[in-house]
């Protein structure tokens, strides 16, 4: 689990949460008040002093539980951070 900061690209509204089920394609964000399905966002995940940031879209949302997020445009430096985290998770 890691801290997450989400920013709505159209309104600049911010939501904080915790991420679970991290994958190369996206993750689940646990938050009380998720953005609606289809919302375009910037997601920043911070873990062990490193930050992964990318553009994403909310794939599904459930009030009180959170939202599924699909990564849509990740630059190579951010991808390297994500790949390192996923490799560490596989090794555990």
Image: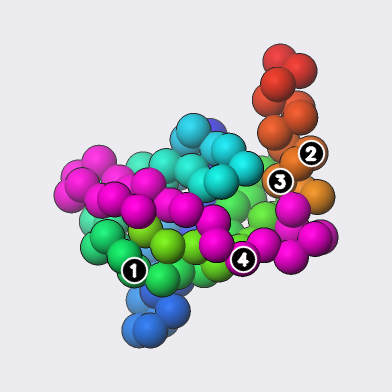
Sequence-wise, which precedes: disc 3 or disc 4? 4
Determine which of the numbered discs, if any, sits on residue 84 in the image: 2
- Callout 3: SS: helix
Residue 5 visible from this viewpoint: yes
Which of pointers 2 and 4 lies earlier in the amino acid sequence? Answer: 4
State how far apart marks 3 and 4 are (Cα): 13 Å
Local crowd size for mark 3, using a 10 Å CA cut-off: few (<14), some (14–19), many (≥20): many
Query: Which residue matches tag 3?
Result: 82
Assess whether mark 3 and mark 2 are in contact (beta carbons under 8 angstroms).
yes
Q: Secondary structure at mark 1?
A: loop
Q: Earlier in the sequence, mark 3 or mark 1?
A: 1
Q: Which mark is residue 73?
A: 4
Quick check: marks 4 and 1 in contact, CB under 8 Å? no
**Mark 1 lies on residue:** 39
Label 2 to label 1: alpha-carbon separation:
27 Å
Q: Nearer the viewer, mark 3 or mark 4?
A: 4
């Amino acid at each position: 689990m890691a801290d997450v900061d989400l920013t709505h690209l159209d309104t600049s509204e911010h939501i904080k949460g915790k991420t679970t089920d991290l994958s190369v394609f996206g993750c689940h964000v646990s938050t009380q008040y998720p953005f609606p399905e289809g919302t375009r966002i910037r997601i920043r995940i911070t873990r062990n002093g490193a930050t992964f940031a990318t553009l994403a879209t909310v794939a599904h949302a459930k009030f009180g539980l959170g939202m599924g997020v699909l990564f849509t445009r990740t630059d190579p430096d951010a991808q390297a951070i994500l790949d390192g985290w996923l490799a560490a998770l596989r090794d555990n």
